[in-house]
Amino acid sequence: MLKEDPLSLFDSINEDSLSTSSDETNFAHLLAPRQNNLNRSGRWRSASDILDSLEKKEDKRTKRLNSQESFLNPDFEWLKNDREAYKMAWLSHRQLTRSCLDLSLMKQSLGWAQTQATDIQIFCKIDHNGGSVQLPDYDITAHIPQGHIPPGEIQEIGLKVLLDPPAGINNNYTTTLSPLLEVSLSNHNISGGISLEMRMAAKVKSDPTSHVLTSFVSLASQRIEGPYQKIKDCYIYNDVLQMKLFDLKPRMYVITAAEATVLELPAMSVWDYLDRHITVAVYGPKHIHPLLKVVLVISSHDNIPPRLPFSDIQRGGRNLPPVVLELWGKHQFNPHGLKDLQIASRVLDSNFEVKPEDLNKEVTQEQLNAGKVLHLPLDLVKVSGGEMCPFKLNIEVKDPNSLTLGDFYITSPEAAPLRSEKHNHRRADRQREVSRSTPIPEESIPEVLTQKFQDRPVDLHWYGVAMKSILRQPRVEYLLEYFKGDTIALLSKETVRSVGQIKVKEWYIGFLRGRVGLVHCKNLKVITKDQVIDFTGIKLTTPVLLDNMTIPFKKLTYMYSAIQTLVTEHVKCWRTFAEALGYSEVSIDAISRRHADTEAEKVACVLEKLKEDCHAEKIKKKFQHELIIGLLKMNVQGVVAHLIQDIVILSTAVELGVRWRELAEKLGKLSNAQIAAYEAPHKGKNGEVSAQSMWKPAYDFLYSWSKRYGDGYRDMIQDLHLALDKMKSPVTKQWRQITGALITVNCMEVLGASAFLRD
């Protein structure tokens, strides 16, 4: 694992990315508009349906698809000596690939075509102190010793898994036992070597002959095609091969293998000396359809990726975007030597069935001996009426003598959930009813104002264990970074919603290593406090939570007159207010420039003093940030809720400018006439609303729109966030302060419950 404070980290599998993927460059000339008749029943169309329909249009599309090939399959070899240029070219290509995906094809089948990268790889920057890099989802680790590079320099190390072995290694005497690992290094000023650990998919049999004639080796090369040489410094611990690489190059390829020196009859292959397992993995769409495709993956090692990009090669080998299938499940079995395999598939007790031509598949021993990952597609079809329910797919593997080697079943996912505007409105209404049923206490209650903010541990009941590593370069505000196996404190089991790369995702609010942020729910296994082994990095106190909650308000916009009215109306004790803002030793005469009689006037004087101090200091404090900290220390959460609501509305209006019209169409379904009515009061002498004034109609609309939520300020900010996410070029991709505000309003109750406990 990497050290807790690496200089800079990033993960190319940016599955946790909060905002929608958007590309500023216009690549419309690459994707000409297509008119099709696939819009009917798009929810129930699988990739097979779409490919069948598109087959009729092959002649018209051949020229256009060929023109995209050079864009979707670029050659970066000429940049291999310039690491930074190579990285930027790769990132740009990935963004271009997302733009060039056939969106008309993707939208017809939920859960099939997705845009995230499916390669398993990681890049990390490590300094003179060294560290470790673990490849997510794989039992592969690189250890970089201290002093590997001179002090002050940086080593950027990349690990990438290639599932298929290089040609020429696998034969009767040698068989590979792991995926091929690509190791890249950016800094050539190296002293010493690095260590690698890779888990092997076999053990030597216990008989003496196998032990004498078989050995495990590690092979390395500077080129993917070879030649490969044995690494001398290798050590074996159980099924893990540890090796040391000393002759380091900018790019290296490493793989583990078993080697037989002699084959003594009856042995016909090195496989006969090994207890090895073959993995059968089943991939399919995220949601089942009446006609769907499932892919059986046969692998000689157990490193199975969670997603599989798959193109139907039996459809003419088009250069169409591959569909990305989810891992439904996997199973391992021992073939007891190298032999042909018969694979039978059938659906158990369901209204689905496997098409007759796919019921039986065969894998030859020549295919197994080559060591490549095999893909066996199956077509499944719904054969009777009734509701679509998850089914069990039974897989049975037999040898040529009909002896069963493996027999298991995998349960499919459910059908895609029904989505309709009416359903969404009903759910939103229920959420607002819940919000109204538990209103925030009014701050006119004297006891609330006399409570003191206490520095104590936050009482948390739920935690999560990270199922994968998520590291980003550059860091994304309000998204947590973590390593596989990290324990993350959860502030609540309730989730917030935001658009990920292509769809709305559910996120927990978590705390790890001093930061509060969002964690994708699917990346965590939720556990209770009693199940936590190590609380290092997840001990959260009320001051730390308060600091994290108020970070976004350093960059948001406020309107002083509105704040003054709100605070003076609801804060009833000027002395408590002054104390919370850090003026505990200052008299009202020292604060005020004018005579103040009433409590409200004194509160206004304290507020004005805070504003002047924030703008006068050399290292400027932010007025709204310090104010919200003070109000939260007073536990006047009702005032804070109204204040945040106003700040979010105003800041969004200023950020959007003229683009408020697009948001208005999404949120309020406004017509052009209604939009013009909002803009009419703000037009200048030329009859147009200037760019500098466009925030005013935006604010008017958002203010009136927010009134429908009543006290449901959480729902208001949540729905606004989703609407901003779904814009064509989402402002939330760069402007993430509203994400911070969403976190703030969902943490207020937790802070109040822990910081103001009554004895």
Image (cartoon, rainbow, N blue to C red):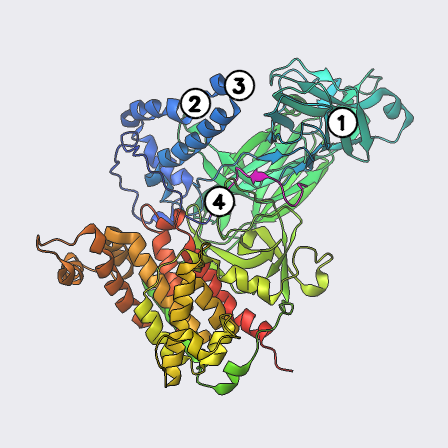
Task: Please rate how many residues cluster around mark 4, counting C-alpha atoms within 10 Å: few if below 14, some from 14 to 19, many from 20.
Answer: many
- Kindly identify which residue carries mark 4: 285
Residue in view at x 47 percent, y 75 percent: 578
Give yes or no for contact between labels 4 and 2 (Cβ–Cβ under 8 Å). no
Asked whether residue 213 appears in the rendered view, the answer is yes
Q: Is residue 589 located in the magenta-colored stretch of the structure?
A: no
Viewer-nearest residue: 254 or 569: 569
- The image quarter containing residue 253 is top right
Secondary structure beneath label 2: loop
- Kindly identify which residue carries mark 1: 243
Farthest top residue in view: 227
Inspect the image, locate mark 2, and give the three-letter code of the amino acid beneath it: Pro
Give yes or no for contact between labels 3 and 2 (Cβ–Cβ under 8 Å). no
- First-in-chain label (4 vs 2): 2
Inspect the image, locate mark 4, and give the three-letter code of the amino acid beneath it: Pro
- Kindly identify which residue carries mark 2: 74
Q: Nearer the viewer, mark 3 or mark 1?
A: 3
Residue interval drawn in magenta: 1-17
Farthest right residue in view: 208
Secondary structure beneath label 1: strand
| Residue 439, horizontal then vertical, whole percent | 44, 79
Spatial CA span between label 4 and label 2 = 28 Å
| Residue 279, horizontal then vertical, whole percent | 66, 36
Name the mark on residue 81: 3
Inspect the image, locate mark 3, and give the three-letter code of the amino acid beneath it: Asn
Q: Is residue 12 located in the magenta-colored stretch of the structure?
A: yes
Q: Nearer the viewer, mark 4 or mark 3?
A: 3
